[in-house]
Image: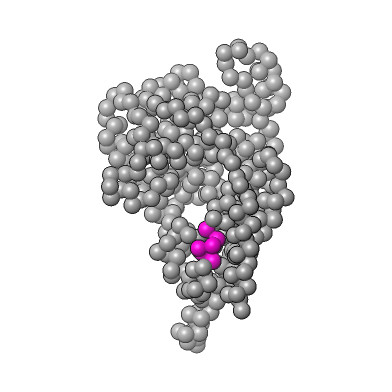
Amino acid sequence: MVHTSSSSAIGRGFTLSVLRVCIYSSHDSRALLLLLPATRTAWQSTGRLSSARYYSSPSSSSSAAATASPKQPQEIAVPLSVSPDAANPPASTRPPPLDVPVRAPETSTFSHLFSVGKAYLTFYKTGLGQIFTNMQLVRALPAATTTRSHLLLRERFQHDIRRLPLFGLLMFVCGEFTPLVVLAVPSTVPYTCRIPAHASKLQRRLEAQRDTARRKLLGDYDDVNATIITTRIMADVVARSLGLVSPHWERIGGAPGPLALLRVRKRLHHLAEDDDLLVQAGGAPALEPEEVRLAANDRGVDVTGRTDDELRGVLERWLRVTTVTDNVEERERRMLVLLSRSTENWP
């Protein structure tokens, strides 16, 4: 009876999702060139990596804009107030708590396994329910994205609703054995249905893939002075370090250049928008602990074994570097350098 109601609910959710058409703007297709040594020198001599824009007050920003030269980008006023509601998406976009029962000495193996399976089934049902909750929240949003909370709510809902039909089918067929089956197909699991052990495994795999890609880049180019890193090379490294392409492409020499470049440019566009909205909401201090780790991971930062306070500091450094300029190409170059290196090697 539970399966039947779940199937009908999934069908209704999939039908409603088809009615929602999301249009994203994209940048022009001009290729980017990155000179790692030259770019770093330019930052130190002209950019100075200052935090003036990041911490500017409305009054000081307005006066600076009035006296600025027409050839220089104007400073953008950034409120200093911290707004957690604007910075963090609803808790329903993240997995619910998973309460796995502890086996008592007098409990039989069968009874314990049955209780564990029931706990996982309850977890998945709650996660699926959160997807429909998020659907109602998305419908109530204004047409334009005004806060980081709105942006991430839309993106996570779209991610989950695309995976809902197949995951719902797996859950309908496998029932309590779903946690074992999805280990073979992790990409089919919505965000709200990822168990902690599954999420940790995916995180460790991504960080290992990220380390391999960065080591290869440093081994090939770091010992050459004034080496020009083309868009294709950089896009391939960043795409692998962020998990934007399947690791199976490694078997044939890497993902196609145009595919990696397209996905990297979309991610850069998303990160630029996310940075601006995060700064408007008060920066890293406004983020909840779980969102700190998610934001750091989105920016290519390894989070395993690091504290929340340490990751907040890393996000502060990222924002100071990437939001100091309004020039799109310069901003993308800065993000590419940060994404292609571990935090210990950031400028």
Residue shown at 41% from the left, 37% from the top: 261
Q: Quadrant of the C terminus?
A: top left
Residue 256 falls in which quadrant of the image?
A: top left
221 left or right, relative to 276: left
Specify whether residue 101 is in view.
no
Is 264 placed left or right of 294 in the picture? left
x and y percentages locating residue 189 in the rendered image: 50, 60
* 339 over 100 or under it: above or below: above
The image position of residue 227, as x and y in percent, is: 31, 26
In the rendered image, which quarter is residue 232 located in? top left
**Dominant SS in magenta:** helix
Residue at horizontal 56%, vertical 67%? 124
Picture layout, residue 315 above or below residue 66: below
Q: Is residue 74 left or right of residue 101?
A: right
Quick one: 56 or 309, which is closer to the camera? Answer: 56
Along the viewing direction, whichever of 315 and 105 lies nearer the viewer: 315
Q: Position of residue 20 (x, y in %)?
A: 63, 50
Q: Is residue 254 visible?
A: yes
Rendering colour mode = one colour
* Residue 90 spot, x, y in % from top left: 65, 53
The image quadrant where one finds the N terminus is bottom right
| Residue 48 vs residue 327, the one in the foreground | 327
User: Which residue is rendered at x = 35% and y = 29% of the image?
Assistant: 230
- Give the residue at x 60% y 26%: 53
Query: How many numbered discs sit on the rendered protein?
Result: 0
| Residue 78 shown in magenta | no
Instruction: Give the residues drawn in magenta, as a range.
Output: 163-168
